[in-house]
Image (cartoon, rainbow, N blue to C red):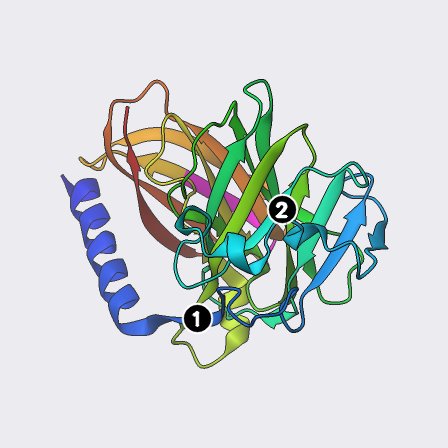
């Protein structure tokens, strides 16, 4: 009973802190309504591999907008809101076609990239594939954060809003790339892209860098999800999953770890559907978040 009471108290305090000490701000929104493409500050690139050297695309070869003339974009199926979107179709020149954003500064809280995607496969044996990659200021390396793959797609509408967790880049300046992968014969459109970053109400930004726990993704999940956290002090780290009763459902980490960003995969295939809590303890501090398992 004592353990359960303390656990519930910590959740209550966490909830109150979240209400009073954090708010989200929109870093940018892009709906491709400027009438020019790519939009101001954006770039198109091509490459032979996902992480390989990128090539400038000649102006006359506007692949990301190649089938998106003004009349086509007035067809509602391609557009989520407004009068235009960014689109691309199969081409034989590059294996990967990059649409790269300008550089943006993230806040020190949780950050999410949100966007709507429309897709169609012209042949049932092919599939739709889009990668999301991020590059930090001063780096030449792109970090792959998400890959979307729809097999044998035949739909002609926007799927649910997509979300990519960018919390691991908190407090940094980044560029975001939407990378179309040639997989045979399909079309893809993007619309209503936004980057939302949480501002946490602590006066010293360095305090945020010491200890942070991201929301798991996906959430709800079945049966697996990913948990990310950051700790700038090496030492013992515990990451534990509890059920709604406050009982230990899984011990994910209980070991000495180096400082830095960490990613943990949690498999809930042996658990029943319901609400679970994951608690991170390190350096004498702890934080708890909620996740939902749906089977």
Earlier sequence position, callout 2 versus callout 1: 1
255 vs 126, nearest the viewer: 126
For residue 26, the mark is 1
156 vs 45, nearest the viewer: 156
* Residue bearing the label numbered 2: 88
For residue 18, the mark is none
Residue 4 place in picture, x, y as percent: 18, 41
Residue 134 vs 295, above or below: the answer is: below
Q: Specify the principal SS of the magenta part.
A: strand
Residue 153 place in picture, x, y as percent: 49, 27
Instruction: Check disc 2: other Cα within 10 Å, few if <14, some if 14-19, many if 20+.
Output: many
The answer to whether the residue labelled 2 contacts the one labelled 1, judged by CB atoms less than 8 Å apart, is: no
Q: Secondary structure at mark 2?
A: strand
Residue positioned most to the bottom: 203
Residue 29 vs 189, above or below: the answer is: below
Q: Determine whether, in the image, residue 242 is placed left or right of residue 139.
A: left
Q: Quadrant of the N terminus?
A: top left
Q: Secondary structure at mark 1?
A: strand
Residue 91 place in picture, x, y as percent: 73, 39
Q: Please identify the quarter of the rendering in which residue 62 is found.
A: bottom right
Residue 36 place in picture, x, y as percent: 62, 69
Q: Determine whether, in the image, residue 281 is placed left or right of residue 104.
A: left
Q: Please identify the quarter of the rendering in which residue 169 is found.
A: bottom right
Q: Is residue 267 visible?
A: yes
User: Which residues fall within the magenta stretch?
Assistant: 233-239
Q: Determine whether, in the image, residue 155 is placed left or right of residue 136.
A: left
235 drawn magenta: yes
- Between the residue at mark 2 and the residue at mark 1, the CA separation in whole angstroms equals 26 Å
Q: Is residue 134 visible?
A: no
* Residue at 78% over, 61% down: 139
* Residue at 24% over, 53% down: 11
């Amino acid at each position: 009973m004592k353990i359960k009471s303390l656990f519930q108290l910590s959740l209550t305090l966490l909830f109150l802190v979240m209400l009073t000490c954090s708010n989200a701000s929109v870093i940018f929104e892009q709906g491709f309504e400027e009438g020019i493409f790519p939009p101001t500050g954006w770039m198109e690139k091509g490459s032979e591999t996902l992480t390989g050297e990128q090539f400038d695309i000649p102006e006359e070869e506007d692949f990301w907008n190649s089938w998106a003339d003004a009349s086509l974009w007035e067809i509602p199926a391609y557009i989520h809101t407004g009068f235009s979107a960014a689109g691309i179709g199969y081409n034989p020149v590059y294996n990967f076609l990059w649409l790269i954003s300008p550089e943006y500064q993230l806040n020190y809280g949780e950050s999410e990239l949100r966007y709507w995607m429309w897709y169609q496969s012209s042949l049932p044996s092919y599939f739709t594939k889009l990668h999301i990659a991020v590059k930090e200021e001063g780096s030449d390396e792109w970090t792959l954060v998400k890959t979307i793959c729809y097999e044998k797609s035949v739909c002609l509408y926007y799927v649910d809003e997509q979300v990519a967790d960018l919390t691991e880049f908190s407090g940094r300046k980044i560029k975001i790339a939407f990378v179309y992968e040639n997989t045979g014969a399909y079309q893809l459109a993007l619309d209503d892209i936004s980057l939302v970053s949480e501002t946490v109400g602590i006066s010293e930004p360095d305090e945020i860098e010491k200890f942070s726990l991201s929301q798991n993704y996906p959430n709800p999940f079945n049966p697996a999800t990913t948990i990310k956290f950051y700790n700038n002090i090496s030492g013992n780290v515990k990451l534990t999953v509890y059920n709604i009763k406050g009982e230990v459902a899984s011990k994910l980490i209980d070991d000495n770890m180096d400082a830095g960003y960490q990613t943990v995969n949690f498999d809930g295939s042996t658990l029943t559907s319901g609400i679970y809590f994951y608690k991170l303890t390190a350096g004498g501090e702890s934080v708890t978040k909620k996740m939902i398992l749906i089977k």
